[in-house]
Amino acid sequence: MRLDHGKHDWPWWKSEVITKWDNNSWRFNMKNAFESAIFNSEKDKLLTWFLKQKDRLSALHPDMSEYMINMKILRKCGGKLEHYIKCRCVEPCSTEDYINAMEDIITGKRTGKTWFRVPMESKMVSKTSREDKRPDIPVLKCHKCGRTSNLANTCTKKTKINEVEVIEEVQCTEEKE
């Protein structure tokens, strides 16, 4: 086809492609490809992914404005990344501004990257050292009889407080005589 028609600009080629392949199955495949493509910063390169999505949307909806195309693409980026980009860019932004903002956010905040928690050996050591530093549990014993098998509220023996006082009085009277 290129040999037959020679060099032309992109809008001409786009119209030729649409006239040749514009049918229901092609539109269905393009729509499914757009809906299934979710941005993952570990797998996809930002520029190629963004421009591929923009080409798919512009082929499906040629009358859609650039702002609406960019908003639909941003919805495919994910919650936090979409929020950060919308906060950074003022509404009438070009595609270049969105791509630059996305690159800054991804490289600066590492947004969109999966987080794997790795257990550290130092944390494991600190847990064992905490167990060693625990104070010994005090031995509970009865205040009435002094045994460890029961407490004062369940003790069957009588208190011996009065006996101590009586012994002291007897000793004092003996000394006076």
Image (cartoon, grey):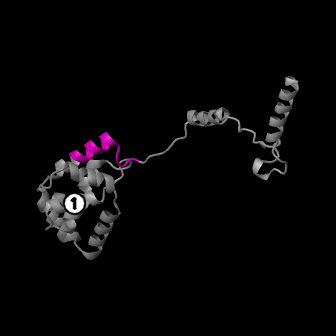
Q: Is residue 129 visible?
A: yes
Q: Amino acid at mark 1?
A: Met
Q: Say whether residue 159 is magenta.
A: no
At 17% from the left edge and 48% from the top edge, which residue is drawn?
97
Q: Nearer the viewer, residue 176 or 77?
A: 176
Q: Residue at x 38, y 49 (%)?
A: 43
Main SS type for the magenta part?
helix
Q: Is residue 5 above or below residue 96?
A: below
Q: Is residue 87 left or right of residue 166?
A: left
Quarter location, residue 164: top right
Residue 4 shows up from this direction: no
Residue situated in front as seen by the camera: 163 or 22: 163
- Residue 50 against residue 177 in the figure, above or below: below
In the rendered image, residue 87, in percent from the top left (x then y), is placed at: 22, 51
Q: Where does residue 72 sit, x and y in percent of width and height?
A: 24, 62
The quadrant the C terminus occupies is: top right
Q: Quadrant of the N terminus?
A: bottom left
Counting from the top left corner in percent of width and height, residue 132 is at 67, 33
Residue shown at the point (30%, 59%) measured from the top left: 76
Identify the magenta region. Answer: 100-113
| Foreground residue among 135 and 39 | 135
Q: Is residue 107 magenta?
A: yes
Q: Secondary structure at mark 1?
A: helix
Side of 86 relative to 138 (left or right): left
Q: Position of residue 129 (x, y in %)?
A: 63, 32
Q: Quadrant of residue 11?
A: bottom left
Q: Residue furthest front?
A: 177
Number of on-image labels: 1
Question: In the figure, 98 relative to 66: above or below?
Answer: above
Where 103 sits versus 24, above or below?
above
Q: Residues within 10 Å of mark 1 (few under 14, many from 20)?
A: some
Q: Give the residue at mark 1.
A: 71
